[in-house]
Image: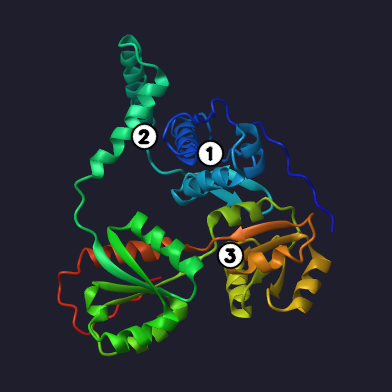
Amino acid sequence: MSRREPLRLVPPVGLQVNREISVPVHVQLKTQIRHLITTGSLKPGGQLPTVRQLAGYLRINPNTAAKALAELHQDGYLESRPGRGTFVAERPPARERRTAQSLAQLVDQGLERARRLGYSADEFLATVAARAPLAGARKAKPTRALLVECNWEEISRFGEELEAELPLSVERLLVDDLPERVRRDPAFARRFAVVITTFFHVHEVKRALAAESIPVVALLTETSISTLLRLSELPEGSTVGLVCATAQGSQNLLRSVESAGLAHLRPVLATADDPWSITRMLEATSVVVCSEQAVEKLRTVLPPTAEVIVDSRTLDRGGLDLLRDLLGRLDAPRAGREWMTG
């Protein structure tokens, strides 16, 4: 299979990271790129360097660069064009240029006042970062929720994502353990305001909680945007292996790639526990997208030249918004009500 090196682009002027302050590197990068877009320094339709080029220029981890671009993509500032790369959105969010410039001026004024008082720029920025969490210190007590999934890798990541996005305190439980837990403790589910799972397990959860009136929320999961961004950078006609621990998981991964409009790729599906399918896949490609559950098994059989893209699946943004709306209405009567999102 022929592979073409992506066009090397010069990173936008002014991008830099400061590792001496407490602001995460991906937040620094995201903020700077967003500022360049909102002030017009990066024009709509302008192409950005690839994740690898950006990471190499700034000397940061490629996953860090991918996270910054992924969040800008989610916020509407960037868009992917299959086979070509990442571009500034033709219609970025309507943030006034004057507002962005005013914020920059406010920061400049703060830096100048700090300098006059004898403080360095790093000390000023570190103090701002340390003070920022105080703004949210008086948040309301989080709502108790039960998250039910089939494996600890995803249940841990989804739990962290839910607690970061929503005012939730999430207890984790494997779906196979739910029926026995309810049998041993009939009041167990009543400790929670809501039970959260994915569409793949919603019927199992509903069956185990048949006697309860607690809302059951089923969320969709999707391939992470950082994975899709990397795939969009591959040349037209590239063959890509899609591997999960189960055949159903590989099919779900294929649907995610297709729904993202990545029609320039030629996918080959395989299952981690099926050596024949892995061999067949490796005869066609050395670029492999796999789930976290499959990656350890794959590393023992993949050649060192293979590119492995680990797909850490994320919760669908629309589902999170609907869940946020539900949390705001949980004081209404809930008897007999079920909620499914996505």
At mark 2, the secondary structure is loop
Local crowd size for mark 3, using a 10 Å CA cut-off: few (<14), some (14–19), many (≥20): some
- Disc 3 designates what residue? 292
- Marks 2 and 1 sit apart, C-alpha to C-alpha, by 15 Å
Q: From the image, state whether disc 1 or disc 3 is nearer to you.
A: 3
Local crowd size for mark 2, using a 10 Å CA cut-off: few (<14), some (14–19), many (≥20): few
- Residue at 54% x, 49% y: name it: 79
The amino acid pointed to by label 1 is Pro
Q: What is the quadrant of residue 295 in the picture?
A: bottom right
- Residue at 65% x, 56% y: name it: 231
The amino acid pointed to by label 2 is Glu
- Residue at 31% x, 85% y: name it: 182
- Disc 1 designates what residue? 44
> In the drawing, does residue 176 fall left or right of residue 13?
left
Q: Earlier in the sequence, mark 2 or mark 1?
A: 1
Give the answer, above or below, for where 288 lies relative to 117: below
Residue 106 place in picture, x, y as percent = 32, 23
Residue 110 place in picture, x, y as percent = 32, 20
- Disc 2 designates what residue? 96
The single residue placed furthest to the front in the displayed view is: 184
At mark 3, the secondary structure is helix
Q: Is residue 78 visible?
A: no
- Residue at 42% x, 80% y: name it: 175
